[in-house]
Image (cartoon, rainbow, N blue to C red):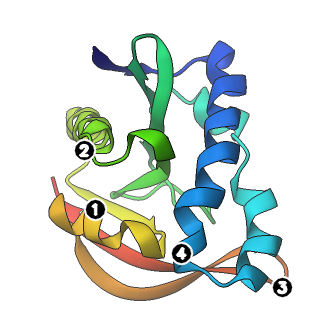
Amino acid sequence: MFSVRTANHSDIPAVDALFSRSYPILLKPHYPPSVLVTCLPLISRAQPRLVTSGTFYVGLLDGEIVAAGGWTHHGPQSNKQTQRGHIRHVVTDHRHTGRGFGRALITHTLEQANSASIRHMECQSTLMAVGFYRALGFDEIGPFEIELRPGIMFPAVQMIRKI
């Protein structure tokens, strides 16, 4: 049975393992090797502060974390709070995509953000997830490059939806 709950500190190793095993497989068809070799080591790690923020969630299938992600009041490249929520660091285990787990996680995330008076949610989607977010009601704003570190850019698509 699949369920979603708020992540906690003890989930960090499992979330870290989920990112490191699934991002390389999920992103490979959508990004050139030159991007993956520089970006994967930076995005395939759990961010402890985000995981323990209270707005980050894990999806469990029979007790195993198979999906993770959440939202914050500030964008990934800023600590400035805004009136919009921001989807953060979402992934579904590559062995379990297409089963509705990501949709359930995002639905839960949007419900929680709505309860916190967020009325618009933004996301910086990977190239592979644009169709997923579009199916969930997000509209494309346009291409966007995330600066992971000085000189290391990760192509993404800025998206938004009303809650």
The answer to whether residue 69 is seen in the rendering is: no
| Disc 1, SS | helix
Q: Measure the C-alpha gap from mark 2 to mark 4.
A: 21 Å
Whether pointer 2 and pointer 1 mark residues with C-beta atoms closer than 8 Å, the reply is yes
In the rendered image, the vertical position of residue 20 relative to residue 36, given as above or below: above
Q: Residue at x 29, y 43 (%)?
A: 106
Q: Which residue is mark 3?
A: 151
Residue type at mark 4 is Pro
In the rendering, at what x and y percent does residue 4 appear?
Answer: 34, 22
Whether pointer 3 and pointer 2 mark residues with C-beta atoms closer than 8 Å, the reply is no
The answer to whether residue 40 is seen in the rendering is: yes
| Viewer-side label of 3, 2 | 2
Q: Measure the C-alpha gap from mark 1 to mark 3.
A: 29 Å
In the rendered image, the vertical position of residue 33 relative to residue 16, given as above or below: below
Q: Pointer 3: residues within 10 angstroms few (<14), some, or many (20+)?
A: few
| Disc 3, SS | loop
Q: Residue at x 60, y 80 (%)?
A: 31
Q: Which residue is mark 1?
A: 132
Tally of numbered tags: 4
Question: Any mark on residue 29, and which?
Answer: 4
Q: Measure the C-alpha gap from mark 3 to mark 2.
A: 33 Å
